[in-house]
Image: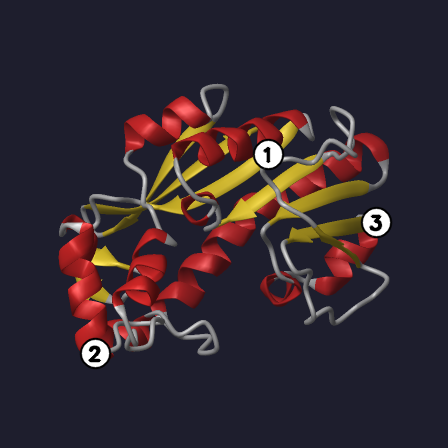
Amino acid sequence: MKLIHALQDNSDPNSLVSRFRRARSRRVVTLIEKIAAEQGEVRIVDLGGEAGYWQLFDVELLRRCKVHITLVNPGGVDDVWDERLFSVVDDDATRLPQYPDNSFDLVHSNSVVEHVGDWVRMEAFATECRRLAPRYYVQTPYFWFPVEPHFSSLFFHWRSEQSRARALMRRAHGFSQKAPDVGAAMRDVQHARLLDKNQFRFLYPDAVHHDEKVGPLTKSLIAIRT
């Protein structure tokens, strides 16, 4: 399991997760360049995003395309590394009534929809993704990939919630520390609810869907509306 966790180390540019993120960024760059060519600037809202993620991108390209990124996160974001590039909004991305339809040019979301809560909140989040801009890019881990990315464990997400909670009470798993009691364990377990293809396509029916693969296996799901 330590090997799996090492492969998921965001701070290591050579880790598996870093390589996948760079590959995903190329899809986003294509959208940014297309929007910039059409209108000379690009307004992005990153739902659940953090500023550190955008260091994957060529900063000069972002500046050349006149990109501005609004980061929406409950509790805000404290890792902003360029105040000219980012705005920070402390809010719930499942409901953003302060923004009219198409307030932005591109909605971006990387590994967030699985964290927003139950199915009703997932639908609300997807509605905002589809409403806030003409284009969107949404990525989420795939339920049927055997490694659970948040707990860095094989088959962990296929077990019952009760079994997963008991496991977290015994020891740490991946990015989750050993839980002191069943309440903390259940909060960790329910913080990540992975989606299958039918669910993801229901949430984003007007997108082109892509499978991100490790060998023959689908690791993550990507929805893009262009």
The amino acid on which the numbered mark 1 sits, given as a three-letter code, is: Tyr
The mark found on residue 171 in the picture is 2
Q: Which residue is mark 3?
A: 66
> Residue drawn at (83%, 49%), measured in percent from left and top?
66
Image quadrant where residue 104 sits: top right
For residue 63, side relative to residue 11 (left or right):
right
The mark found on residue 136 in the picture is 1
Nearer-N-terminus badge (3/2): 3
> Residue drawn at (48%, 49%), measured in percent from left and top?
112
> Residue drawn at (41%, 58%), measured in percent from left and top?
20
Quadrant where the N terminus lies? Answer: bottom left
Q: Mark 2: few, some, or many residues within 10 Å (few <14, many ≥20)?
A: few
Q: Secondary structure at mark 2?
A: loop
The amino acid on which the numbered mark 3 sits, given as a three-letter code, is: Lys
* Mark 2 or mark 1, whichever is nearer to me: 2
Q: Is residue 140 above or below residue 84?
A: above
Q: Is residue 111 above or below residue 170?
A: above
